[in-house]
Image: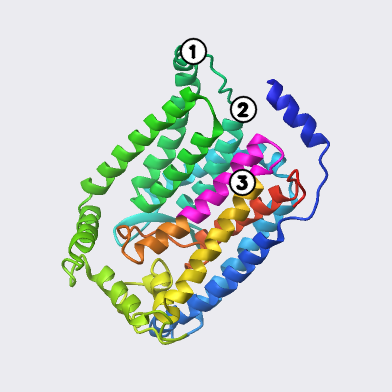
């Protein structure tokens, strides 16, 4: 065991619990309530048309929130240093589920992302986010980055660190991109990369991190242009970016066109709660209360409402990184940072896609998207942050 790990162990043994970061808890409660209200508002048309019950999707979302509270409570009360010991078995099970999706999964709109376990459909790619963050936190914390020179870093770090990281991330990302699910793949790769970057402070590690970034960028470009529907989304995005107009508004650009119509009609203050027109079947499929719910929020609550949501996530980023900085050991620091980066990045990418800043990717917004798997893993992530915040060194 290294000196650093001995020091961490000694420091941890002297720590006592204190109250968790209540601001994170209040943030989660308020966002969950607000999300449920907006999901109801945006789903009324579809729920009535398909199920004859305007409360159908609201009821389902509340059920998922209740189900998600069970593992969240277990995670909160179980010392994170102990449940991290299960990170490898959890990752293996998750990889097994990702394989099962490809072999036995349920296909919806050309994508195979769900697998039925009894009466419930789950999306293993969502659970892969937490599983991989947990494993990388434990694995990266054990690495020794104190190389004397680049030669030693190449001889030891290349095989022990860089290629191992690429292999671990590559297996998970490859299985998810095959579903296909580029949005989740981007979130997982970006979060994992940032965790890898901040895990070490040597020049050799930084150089290795840059090589990983270049590789991920090239693979991302390839994934975006080799699939026809993804390439079309990219073309639609660049058309909007350079001409200010959506290309093929009745075809590939239809969804973005409807999103922009809704946002534009909302203006600064919005039309008011329950006044969205785009939720009445203009936004394709069920996206009004899933991936494009933020667009409905902007239509009803305007730029002002959207700004409040964005600032709320900025606040969450500050509190989450503060927990990471004050965590009692390296694995706690990486775990808190990974969870925070994942949730904030996912929220920002969803909102950016809904205002045309990036191509549409189908990324759910934590708390502001209808869905069981996403809701459960979001609550689990919040519970992990609250758990770590009980052991921070400054007690705040």
Residue that numbered label 3 is attached to: 336
The mark that comes first in sequence, 2 or 3, is 2
Locate the N terminus and report the quarter of the image it occupies. top right
Relative horizontal placement of residue 60, taking residue 51 as reference (left or right): right
The mark that comes first in sequence, 3 or 1, is 1
Dot 2, how many residues are within 10 Å of its Cα: few (below 14), some (14-19), or many (20+)? Answer: some
Q: Nearer the viewer, residue 261 or 77?
A: 261
Q: Nearer the viewer, residue 273 or 317?
A: 317
Relative horizontal placement of residue 354, taking residue 233 as reference (left or right): right
Report the span colored magenta.
Answer: 325-345
The residue sitting at 74% across, 52% down in the picture is: 396
In the drawing, what numbered circle is on residue 152? Answer: 1
The residue sitting at 58% across, 58% down in the picture is: 316
The residue sitting at 46% across, 33% down in the picture is: 168
Q: Whole-Å distance between the Cαs marked 2 and 3?
A: 16 Å
Q: Secondary structure at mark 3?
A: helix
Q: What x and y, as percent, mark residue 78? A: 73, 48
The dominant secondary structure in magenta is: helix
Q: Is residue 249 visible?
A: yes
The residue sitting at 54% across, 17% down in the picture is: 147
* Colour option used: rainbow
Q: Secondary structure at mark 1?
A: helix
Dot 3, how many residues are within 10 Å of its Cα: few (below 14), some (14-19), or many (20+)? Answer: many
Q: Nearer the viewer, residue 377 or 202?
A: 202
Residue that numbered label 2 is attached to: 142
The mark that comes first in sequence, 1 or 2, is 2
Dot 1, how many residues are within 10 Å of its Cα: few (below 14), some (14-19), or many (20+)? Answer: few
Q: Secondary structure at mark 2?
A: loop
Is 18 magenta? The answer is no
Q: Nearer the viewer, mark 1 or mark 2?
A: 1
Q: Quadrant of residue 363?
A: bottom left
């Amino acid at each position: 065991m290294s000196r650093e790990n001995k020091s961490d162990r000694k420091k941890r043994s002297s720590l006592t619990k204190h109250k968790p970061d209540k601001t994170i808890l209040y943030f989660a409660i308020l966002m969950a309530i607000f999300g449920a209200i907006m999901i109801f508002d945006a789903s009324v048309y579809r729920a009535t048309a398909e199920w004859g019950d305007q409360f159908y999707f609201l009821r389902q979302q509340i059920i998922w929130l209740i189900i998600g509270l069970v593992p969240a409570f277990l995670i909160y009360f179980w010392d994170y240093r102990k449940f991290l010991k299960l990170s490898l078995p959890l990752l293996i099970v998750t990889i097994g589920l990702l394989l099962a999706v490809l072999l036995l999964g349920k296909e919806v709109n050309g994508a195979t992302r769900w697998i039925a376990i009894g009466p419930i459909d789950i999306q293993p790619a969502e659970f892969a986010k937490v599983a991989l963050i947990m494993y990388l936190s434990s694995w990266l914390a054990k690495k020794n980055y104190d190389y004397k020179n680049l030669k030693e870093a190449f001889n030891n770090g290349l095989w022990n660190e860089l290629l191992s990281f690429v292999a671990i991330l590559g297996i998970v990302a490859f299985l998810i991109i095959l579903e296909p699910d580029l949005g989740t793949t981007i979130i997982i790769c970006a979060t994992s990369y940032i965790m890898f970057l901040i895990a070490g402070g040597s020049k050799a590690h930084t150089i290795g991190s840059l090589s990983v970034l270049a590789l991920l960028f090239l693979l991302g470009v390839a994934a975006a242009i080799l699939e026809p529907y993804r390439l079309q989304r990219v073309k639609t995005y660049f058309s909007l970016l350079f001409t200010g107009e959506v290309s093929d508004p009745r075809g590939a650009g239809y969804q973005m066109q409807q999103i922009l119509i809704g946002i534009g009609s909302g203006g600064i203050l919005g039309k008011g709660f329950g006044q969205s027109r785009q939720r009445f079947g203009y936004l394709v499929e069920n996206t009004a209360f899933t991936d494009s719910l933020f667009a409905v929020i902007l239509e009803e609550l305007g730029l002002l409402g959207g700004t409040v949501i964005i600032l709320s996530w900025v606040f969450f980023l500050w509190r989450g990184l503060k927990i990471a900085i004050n965590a009692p050991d390296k694995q706690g620091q990486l775990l808190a940072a990974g969870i925070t980066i994942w949730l904030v990045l996912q929220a920002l990418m969803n909102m950016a896609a809904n205002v045309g800043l990036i191509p549409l990717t189908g990324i759910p917004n934590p708390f502001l998207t209808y869905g069981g798997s996403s809701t459960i893993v979001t609550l689990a992530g919040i519970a992990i942050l609250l758990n770590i915040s009980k052991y921070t060194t400054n007690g705040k």
